[in-house]
């Protein structure tokens, strides 16, 4: 195909390092239109606004809204002719089935799927604890595993028919360091491990996602083929996913419905 046209969004904000790393990498062979939040909108899921303000930005458009807003605004009003939506690169991994609905990065890709536009969500796994990860990955080169994998997928996935089956890809990459080889790709499924805890202390209750500590300590039951296992072992995880919620014939519910007015 001719040079693809990509809508690039994220949830860390249009001025984030990971966004710039992905913008620069994709701009080498695609037309990129940036439509991203004007500031950090992490972990807002698919929250949607009724009205947003748009400002021009050196990279495209800064939206006073959520990542899902950006996808809708971009595809409906700003750049409706794009071939693909890319969301990222997020600082912090988006791994596991339970995370998919929380992540603003992934939600921007899900929103694109409802427009029948292929999409890729891209995140960087940054090891660390107690907030350390928030101060890491502050150079564009730290994102090289993510940008190289994404560029490869953008360049080849459409022509290979990947999106004939998948509606979007959830990509997670390990951080890159000087002298490292590029991390290999692995096709994965989202892990089902869930380890949220809530602890009450008087009138306050703290919520903790223990999965991150278990990843750091190597205490993971995740089998081979899952996204979290791949990323902990240094590979780029690529999970092909579909957006609509599935529904199955349910005989027990049929029986309840039939008996409802008896």
Image (cartoon, rainbow, N blue to C red):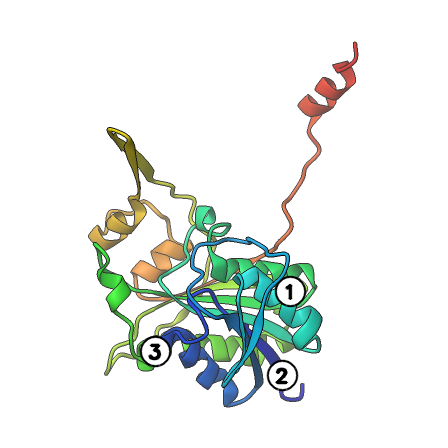
Q: Which residue is drawn at 30% across and 61% down?
A: 233
User: x, y (%) of residue 187?
Assistant: 47, 62
Instruction: Determine if residue 69 is in view.
Output: yes
Which of labels 3 and 2 is toward the front? 2
195 in relation to 49, above or below: above
Instruction: Identify the mark at residue 182; answer none if there is no mark.
Output: 3
Among the 4 quarters of the image, the one containing residue 42 = bottom left
- The answer to which of 31 and 66 lies nearer the viewer is 66
* Residue 172 horizontal side relative to residue 169, left or right: left
Name the residue beneath numbered marker 2.
Answer: 4
Instruction: Identify the element where label 2 is drawn.
Output: loop
Q: Residue at x 54, y 58 (%)?
A: 107
Q: Which residue is drawn at 59% across and 78% down?
A: 6
Instruction: Determine if residue 166 is in view.
Output: no
Instruction: Identify the element where label 1 is drawn.
Output: helix
- The answer to which of 199 and 237 lies nearer the viewer is 199
Instruction: Identify the mark at residue 23; answer none if there is no mark.
Output: none
Name the residue beneath numbered marker 1.
Answer: 72
Marks 1 and 2, how far apart at CA: 19 Å
Q: In which quarter of the image is the N terminus?
A: bottom right
* Residue 136 horizontal side relative to residue 82, left or right: left
* Residue 66 horizontal side relative to residue 235, left or right: right
User: x, y (%) of residue 205?
Assistant: 30, 34
């Amino acid at each position: 195909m001719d040079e693809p046209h990509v809508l690039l969004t994220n949830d860390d904000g249009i001025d984030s390092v990971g966004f710039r790393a992905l913008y620069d990498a994709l701009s080498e062979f695609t037309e990129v239109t940036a439509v991203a939040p004007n500031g950090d909108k992490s972990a807002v899921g698919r929250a949607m606004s009724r009205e947003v303000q748009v400002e021009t930005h050196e990279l495209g458009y800064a939206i006073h809204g959520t990542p899902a807003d950006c996808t809708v605004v971009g595809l409906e009003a700003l750049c409706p002719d794009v071939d693909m939506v890319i969301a990222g690169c997020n600082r912090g991994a988006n791994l596991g089935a339970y995370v998919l609905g929380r992540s603003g990065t992934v939600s921007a890709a899900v929103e694109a799927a409802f427009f029948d536009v292929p999409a890729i969500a891209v995140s960087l796994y940054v090891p660390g604890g107690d907030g350390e990860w928030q101060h890491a990955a502050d150079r564009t080169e730290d994102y090289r595993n993510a940008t190289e994998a994404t560029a490869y997928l953008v360049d080849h996935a459409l022509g290979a028919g990947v999106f004939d089956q998948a509606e979007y890809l959830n990509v997670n990459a390990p951080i890159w360091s000087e002298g490292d080889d590029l991390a290999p790709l692995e096709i994965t499924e989202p892990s089902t491990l869930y380890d949220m805890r809530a602890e009450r202390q008087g009138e306050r209750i703290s919520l903790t996602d223990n999965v991150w500590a278990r990843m750091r300590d190597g205490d993971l039951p995740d089998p081979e083929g899952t996204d979290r296992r791949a990323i902990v072992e240094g590979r780029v995880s690529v999970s092909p996913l579909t957006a609509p919620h599935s529904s199955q014939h349910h005989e027990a519910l049929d029986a309840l419905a039939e008996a409802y007015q008896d």
